[in-house]
């Protein structure tokens, strides 16, 4: 059925060390009619290191609407296309999934060529529970939207994995501490490269280590919420404290309102409100 249609290969490439590539991946890159790369300059370094000389075409977030259909047309004429990203497995945190969907919609064969992934690589050295885990990708750039995302997963018991820009690492850690509490964290940086670093400690310790920006590729892993020990973030506690200090409404009413606004357990909010009320009365 697919004899006259090409194959779209999803090829995993190194996340740092250029030696971390499979023999099969090298063969596919040697044989492919086209290689679709997120950054052709970056991929050319990899191809040159392994003496691979095939036509390169750019495919990234900003040109996927035009390049996606173009690649599909090439596949429909019988050409094979190898899709690569700058580092790791395509489609995990890049527009590769959009090309896969286009190919599937046209009944084009999509073949995975497995290999490195920053998600699983970081998970194996973090020292946190490996399963289950939740991969959240890159958090939003804007702090308010980032805090909203963190609030949504505040009660998740799975190990949480995120990518983050080195420029935003300090702010991201602060928001994590504020919303998730002082949990265990692993900050992995420049994995498989010369300056590889794996930091293991608490979020507060990580904040001291990285109060602002850093350098290199960063993958963050944070312990999930402890079972039976849900956590309210600092901003909610302050909201409760302010409402209780005013003394204008009943405690139950305040707790119910906050719980409904945030989509969290009313019982949890009420218990915290009781603690704050006791503190206020004793103070």
Image: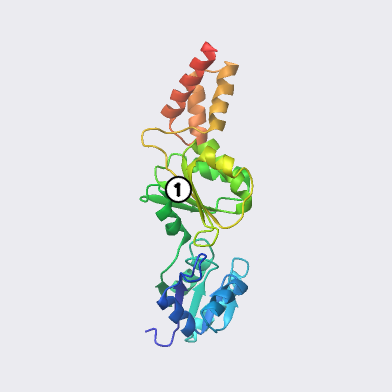
Q: Quadrant of the C terminus?
A: top right
Q: Please state the horizontal and vertical placement of residue 41, each as a whole percent of the image.
A: 62, 74
* Coloration mode: rainbow
Q: Is residue 178 above or below residue 217?
A: above
Q: 226 and 79: which one is in front?
A: 226
Q: Residue furthest top?
A: 282
Q: Is residue 48 visible?
A: yes
Q: Is residue 106 visible?
A: no
Q: 195 and 140: which one is in front?
A: 195
Residue positioned 44% across, 65% down in the render: 116
Q: Please state the horizontal and vertical placement of residue 242, each as a whole percent of the image.
A: 59, 22
Q: Can you identify the residue that label 1 sits on?
A: 160
- Structural crowding at the residue carrying mark 1, measured as other residues with C-alpha within 10 Å and reported as few (<14), some (14–19) or many (≥20): many
Q: Please state the horizontal and vertical placement of residue 166, each as a whole percent of the image.
A: 60, 53
Q: Is residue 190 above or below residue 168?
A: below
Q: Quadrant of the N terminus?
A: bottom left
How many labels were placed on the picture? 1
Residue positioned 54% across, 15% down in the render: 280
Q: Residue furthest front?
A: 194
* Quarter of the rendering containing residue 6: bottom left
* Quarter of the rendering containing residue 68: bottom right
Q: 175 and 189: which one is in front?
A: 189
Q: Please state the horizontal and vertical placement of residue 119, each as a whole percent of the image.
A: 45, 57
Q: Is residue 46 left or right of residue 274?
A: right
SS class, disc 1:
strand
Residue positioned 56% across, 43% down in the render: 173
């Amino acid at each position: 059925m697919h004899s006259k249609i090409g194959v779209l290969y999803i090829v995993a490439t190194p996340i740092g060390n250029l030696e971390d590539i499979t023999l099969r991946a090298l063969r596919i890159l040697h044989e492919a009619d086209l290689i679709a790369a997120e950054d052709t300059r970056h991929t050319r370094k990899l191809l040159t290191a392994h003496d691979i000389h095939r036509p390169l075409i750019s495919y990234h977030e900003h040109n996927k609407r035009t390049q996606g259909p173009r690649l599909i047309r090439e596949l429909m004429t019988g050409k094979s296309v190898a899709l690569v990203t700058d580092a790791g497995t395509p489609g995990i945190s890049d527009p590769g999934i959009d090309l896969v969907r286009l190919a599937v919609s046209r009944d084009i064969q999509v073949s995975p060529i497995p290999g490195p992934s920053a998600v699983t690589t970081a998970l194996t050295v973090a020292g946190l529970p490996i399963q289950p885990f939740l991969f959240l990708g890159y958090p939003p750039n804007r702090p308010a939207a980032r805090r909203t995302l963190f609030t949504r997963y505040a009660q998740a018991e799975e190990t949480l994995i995120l990518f983050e820009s080195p420029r935003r690492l300090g702010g991201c850690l602060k928001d994590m501490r504020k919303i998730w509490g002082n949990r265990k964290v692993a900050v992995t940086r420049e994995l498989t490269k010369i300056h590889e670093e794996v930091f293991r400690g608490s979020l507060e310790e990580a904040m001291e280590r990285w109060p602002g920006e850093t350098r290199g590729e960063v993958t963050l892993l944070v312990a999930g919420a402890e079972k039976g020990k849900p956590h309210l973030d600092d901003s909610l506690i302050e909201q409760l404290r302010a409402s209780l200090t005013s003394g204008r409404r009943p405690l139950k009413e305040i707790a119910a309102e906050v719980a409904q606004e945030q989509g969290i357990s009313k019982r949890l909010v009420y218990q915290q409100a009781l603690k704050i009320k006791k503190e206020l009365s004793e103070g």
